[in-house]
Amino acid sequence: MDEQVEEVRRLLEAIERLEQMQDDEACAKAVTQVLDDWPDLASRLRQLRQERVQRMKNSGKTWQEIGDILGVHFSRAQQIAQGKRGSKRPKKDEVPDA
């Protein structure tokens, strides 16, 4: 796997520190705070990624190059630039029997 970006490593380390908390109440409260903010954080991250993908495309990179950078198919890179989220696959219990 590619070397982790410093900011990603620090985020993952913060989650590990939550896991290592000895005080169950303090840990549960801290995780609740993170989860309460997560929808907004996830939205901000998607917006940031979309903007950066658009900038890469505007700077002359191909969709294939952008997809390779992100580790996704080139068509997914295009979808990210358009602000499209992942596919809405039906849940396993919603899939009709074949």
Image: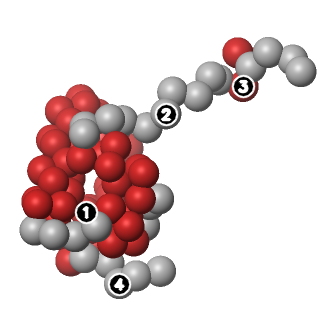
Q: Residues within 10 Å of mark 3 (few under 14, many from 20)?
A: few
The correct choice, above or below, for 70 with respect to 45 in the image is below
Q: Quadrant of residue 84?
A: top left
The correct choice, above or below, for 69 with respect to 55 in the image is below
**Which of pointers 1 and 2 indicates the residue nearer the eye?**
2
**Which of pointers 3 and 1 indicates the residue nearer the eye?**
3
Give the CA separation, mark 3 to mark 2. 14 Å
Q: Would you say the residues marked 4 and 2 are in contact, meaning their CB atoms lie under 8 Å apart?
A: no
Give the CA separation, mark 3 to mark 4. 34 Å
Q: Which mark is residue 87?
A: 2
Q: Secondary structure at mark 4?
A: loop
What residue sits right under mark 1 in the picture? 11
Which numbered disc flags the more N-terminal residue, 4 or 2? 4
Instruction: Give x and y (percent) for residue 59.
Output: 10, 68
Give the CA separation, mark 3 to mark 1. 32 Å
**Which of pointers 1 and 4 indicates the residue nearer the eye?**
4
Which numbered disc flags the more N-terminal residue, 3 or 2? 2
What residue sits right under mark 3 in the picture? 92
Give the CA separation, mark 1 to mark 2. 26 Å
Which numbered disc flags the more N-terminal residue, 1 or 4? 4
What amino acid does circle 4 point to? Answer: Glu
Q: Secondary structure at mark 3?
A: helix
Q: Residue at x 43, y 38 (%)?
A: 86
Q: Would you say the residues marked 1 and 2 are in contact, meaning their CB atoms lie under 8 Å apart?
A: no
Instruction: Give x and y (percent) for residue 40.
Output: 17, 33
Seen from the viewer's position, the closer of residues 38 and 1 is: 1
Q: Which mark is residue 64?
A: none
What residue sits right under mark 4 in the picture? 3
